[in-house]
């Protein structure tokens, strides 16, 4: 089995004398798996996502993503790794309002060195796949919340990432738009995309994830796969 994520004794402390915000934690995510990370506010969900994304560094232990040990990389190498191997979807979209939909999607590919023609072709492919091709020349402010989140997902997928990370992807959406995003993430997982989503939305976790972990006080409290739940001591 190929693991896209491997955390080995990973912990993050923000105060030298305090308890860790996360861990120590051992966690693996297999290629093609969809993992939902849930738990109360302050449980370490965002810290875990930041470690996996290379946005933060562990205070101890190791973080390996797509075969690369992230805690050993410098800042420039981390930025390049994120651009090439990780796609990120945020609660509030983080789209550039002065760019069109097509340009928002194409931008990460061009920043990664893909030529304009190839980046445009990939953006068009994703817009068609995600049902937003008619909005290619629109700006984000002209779209609904659900449509903007579809643009954000397309942007995250443009470089064919090994791992897609989603941070509360339905948190800023109404119920109807949230259902559309749930369907989209479920479809991506069904197509083989490795996915980790942090969410308070248990309906989203049930719909999209093949496995759910619960964090409490920075520790892994429960790991549920399929219909089998295993409490972690």
Image (cartoon, rainbow, N blue to C red):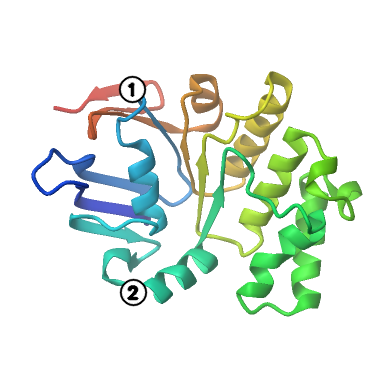
Closest to the camera, between mark 2 and mark 1, is 2
The secondary structure type at the circle numbered 1 is strand
Identify the residue at horizontal 88%, vertical 50% (top origin): 138
Q: Which mark is residue 74?
A: 2
Residue drawn at point x = 68 percent, y = 51 percent: 95
Q: Residue sitting at 50 percent across and 49 percent down?
A: 194
Determine crowd level at label 2: few under 14, some 14-19, many 20+ residues with C-alpha closer than 10 A.
few
Circle count: 2
Which residue is farthest left?
A: 17
Q: Position of residue 199 (x, y in %)?
A: 47, 30
The numbered disc on residue 228 is 1
Q: Would you place residue 201 above or below residue 44 in this image?
A: above
In the displayed structure, 77 sits above or below 167; it is below
Q: Secondary structure at mark 2?
A: loop
Relative horizontal placement of residue 35, taking residue 128 as reference (left or right): left
Q: Is residue 14 left or right of residue 128?
A: left
**Residue 210 location (% of width, % of height):** 46, 33
In the rendered image, which quarter is residue 87 located in? bottom right
Q: Position of residue 13 (x, y in %)?
A: 19, 47
Q: Residue at x 71, y 30 (%)?
A: 180
Q: Nearer the viewer, residue 187 or 147?
A: 147
Residue 1 seen in the current view = no
Q: Is residue 155 above or below residue 80?
A: above
- Percent from the top left, x then y, of residue 222? 27, 26
- Lateral position of residue 12 relative to residue 209, left or right: left
Quarter of image, res 126: bottom right
Between residue 232 and residue 57, name the one nearer to us: 57
Asked whether, in this view, residue 49 is left or right of residue 13, the answer is right
Mark 2 vs 1, N-terminal side: 2
Quadrant of the rendered structure where residue 150 is?
top right
């Amino acid at each position: 089995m190929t693991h896209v994520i491997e955390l080995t004794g990973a912990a993050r402390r923000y105060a030298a004398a305090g308890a860790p915000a996360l861990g120590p934690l051992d966690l693996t995510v297999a290629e093609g798996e969809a993992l939902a990370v849930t738990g109360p506010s302050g449980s370490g969900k965002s810290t875990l996502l930041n470690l996996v994304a290379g946005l933060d560094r562990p205070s101890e232990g190791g973080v390996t993503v797509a075969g690369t040990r992230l805690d050993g990389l410098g800042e420039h190498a981390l930025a390049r790794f994120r651009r090439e191997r990780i796609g990120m979807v945020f609660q509030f979209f983080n789209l550039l309002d002065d760019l069109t939909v097509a340009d928002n999607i194409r931008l990460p590919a061009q920043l990664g060195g893909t030529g304009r023609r190839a980046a445009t072709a990939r953006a068009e492919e994703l817009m068609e796949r995600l049902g937003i091709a008619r909005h290619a020349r629109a700006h984000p402010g002209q779209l609904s919340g659900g449509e903007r989140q579809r643009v954000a997902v397309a942007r995250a997928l443009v470089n064919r990432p090994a791992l897609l990370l989603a941070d509360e992807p339905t948190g800023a959406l109404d119920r109807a738009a949230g259902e559309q995003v749930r369907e989209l993430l479920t479809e991506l997982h069904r197509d083989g995309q490795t996915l980790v989503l942090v969410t308070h939305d248990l309906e989203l976790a049930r719909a999209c994830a093949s496995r759910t972990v619960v964090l409490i006080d920075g520790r892994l409290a429960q790991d549920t796969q399929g219909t089998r739940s295993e409490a972690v001591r």
